[in-house]
Image (cartoon, rainbow, N blue to C red):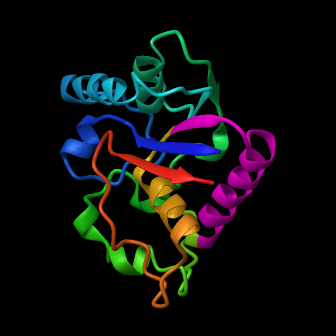
Amino acid sequence: MKLYVVRHGETIENANNCLVGRINSSLTEKGIEQAKKVKEYFKDKTIDLIVSSPLDRCRQTAKIISDDIIPIYYSDSLLGRNHGEFTGKPRDSINFDEYWNYNKNIQYKEAESVKDLYDRIAKLMDDLKGEFKDKSIIIVTHSGVMRVLYYYFNGIPENGILSEITIKNCEVFEYDI
């Protein structure tokens, strides 16, 4: 399986450096342009399916990439991390390394734990690898899910910190499975 993972285009909350999670926001004009550029990235590639988070910013990005040619399937498994009590707050208002530490796996009052997010994404990947092993798939999702997928494929670092990579809007990661 060839897997391409794309972060959605920019939203107002992204531009303001806030923890977005499950806020259902739309793309900015810049986000729409980013999605159009990433669509060009795929124009010469054979893609069988797009699997997307159902939130509007991902739906919009997936629709632009698809251009009504590639079928799109929406999966709640690709929802962003539920930031709970941190939703909408500036990213620098929390200790990001601690928040994304797999080894510590802090249990917050409302926010989804890192291990719960990781387990949700690992299960989805196991399902996709079983069902689409000879296909090329694009996943359109959120930065936190992309972060988990990066460490799913590359291994969790010894210190457990999953925040050591930065993922830009409409950045594409590729994996050969």
Which residue shows up at 58% across the image and 77% down it? Answer: 107
Please say if 103 is above or below 124: below
Residue stretch rendered in magenta on the structure:
115-139
Circle count: 0
Residue 134: percent from left, percent from top: 72, 39
Is 130 one of the magenta-colored residues?
yes
Residue 37: percent from left, percent from top: 26, 27
Residue 135: percent from left, percent from top: 67, 35
Residue 129 relative to residue 23: left or right: right
Please say if 124 is above or below 138: below
Q: Quarter holding the N terminus?
A: top right
Residue 135 relative to residue 170: left or right: right
Please say if 159 is above or below 3: below
Q: Main secondary structure of the magenta part?
A: helix
Residue 67: percent from left, percent from top: 45, 12
> Quick one: which residue is furthest to the right in this view?
130
Is 94 one of the magenta-colored residues?
no
Which residue shows up at 55% across the image and 70% down it? Answer: 114
| Residue 177 vs residue 24, the one in the foreground | 177
The image quarter containing residue 166 is: bottom left
The image quarter containing residue 86 is: bottom left
Which residue shows up at 34% across the image and 50% down it? Answer: 88
Q: Quarter holding the C terminus?
A: bottom right
| Residue 151 vs residue 103, the one in the foreground | 151
> Quick one: which residue is furthest to the top in this view?
68
> Quick one: which residue is furthest to the bottom in this view?
158
